[in-house]
Image (tube, rainbow, N blue to C red):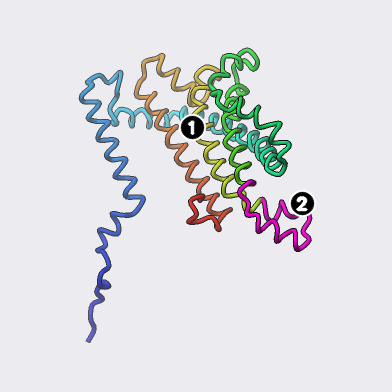
Amino acid sequence: MTTLATPEAGSPPLWRRLSGHRGLIALRSFAVFIGLWWLAHLWKANPLQLPSPQQVGQALWTLVQSGELLQHAAISTSRLSVALLIAIALAIPLGFAMGLSRRLEAYVDPLVELLRPISGIAWIPLGLFIFGIGDTLPVFIMAYVAFFPLLLNTLAGVRQVDGKLVAAARTMGIGRAALVRHVVVPSALPTIMVGLRLAFAGAWAAIVAAELIGAPSGLGFAIEWNRQLLMTPKVFAFIAVIGLVGFLCDALLRALQRRLTPWAEGTGLA
């Protein structure tokens, strides 16, 4: 005689387990946001100022079919990639050098703290004179914004290396280069990855302002162009794409962080 399998005593029902899934929680958050957006649209009663989610969705589909969306998104992401590579090439080696040398930090830190509070957007007027309109100005602004989080997190990661690990490595006769490669870099990597995520977020936010004025293409340019044409649904569509691209790229960086630093899981750094 067979008996039907019964759920374990004390285990929550299936619907409750599913309701706690991160994906479903995110979908509920998006649904609430869209509902509030719809209510605001009805209250405003002016589609030119605040289009409905349906109008924005239709505009988004039109941009996808025409290829305009992919064109501008590809240009902006390529600029962002170049800017991040420049920031990584400059900030991470300098951060390690400052972390390993108090003397170098004493020279460089005052200049960093002088420039860091200056917004990247503040350099746009001067950048227009130096670089003109094109790809160089947005790349410069994004690299400038991404540089400081990477530098400071790299410096903090090097300074937070456990002194006991360093002492143990020196006791075993490990040289300075091997010590940096096998002890300092793995210990600092979780903090560096956090800095990379912060650098990406800042640079991606700055790209809109940089492309509004200093570029003839890209998502920021498309927002300003459609605003001048009073095509508000397309403006909102491009804004939504900026948020979506940022969300997906951050998810990829989180996955890369978990892959490169599995030992940091559960420490608050991953």
Percent position of residue 186, x then y: 64, 53
Cα separation, mark 2 vs mark 1, equals: 45 Å
Nearest to N terminus: mark 2 or mark 1: 1
Q: Which residue is mark 2?
A: 177
Q: Which residue is mark 1?
A: 70
Percent position of residue 203, x then y: 54, 31
Quarter the N terminus occupies: bottom left
Give yes or no for residue 163 being in the magenta stretch: yes
Q: Is residue 222 left or right of residue 236?
A: right
Magenta range: 158-184
Q: Nearer the viewer, residue 245 or 195?
A: 195
**Residue with the most extreme top position:** 129
Seen in the picture, residue 156 relative to 7 is either above or below; the reply is above
Seen in the picture, residue 213 relative to 177 is either above or below; the reply is above
User: Hey, what amino acid is under mark 2?
Assistant: Ala
Q: Nearer the viewer, residue 209 or 68?
A: 209
Which residue lies at the image location 27% right of the left edge and 67% below the top edge? 11
Where, by quadrant of the figure, is residue 82 drawn? Answer: top right
Give yes or no for residue 154 being in the magenta stretch: no
User: Hey, what amino acid is under mark 1?
Assistant: Leu
Which residue lies at the image location 39% right of the left edge and 14% below the top edge? 229
Which residue lies at the image location 76% right of the left edge and 63% below the top edge? 172
Main SS category, magenta section: helix
Judged from the image, the secondary structure of the residue bearing numbered disc 1 is helix
User: Dot 1: few (<14), some (14–19), or many (≥20) neighbours within 10 Å?
Assistant: some
Q: Nearer the viewer, residue 191 or 160?
A: 160
Q: Are marks 2 and 1 in contact (CB under 8 Å)?
A: no
Where, by quadrant of the figure, is residue 65 drawn? Answer: top left
Percent position of residue 219, x then y: 48, 26
Judged from the image, the secondary structure of the residue bearing numbered disc 2 is helix
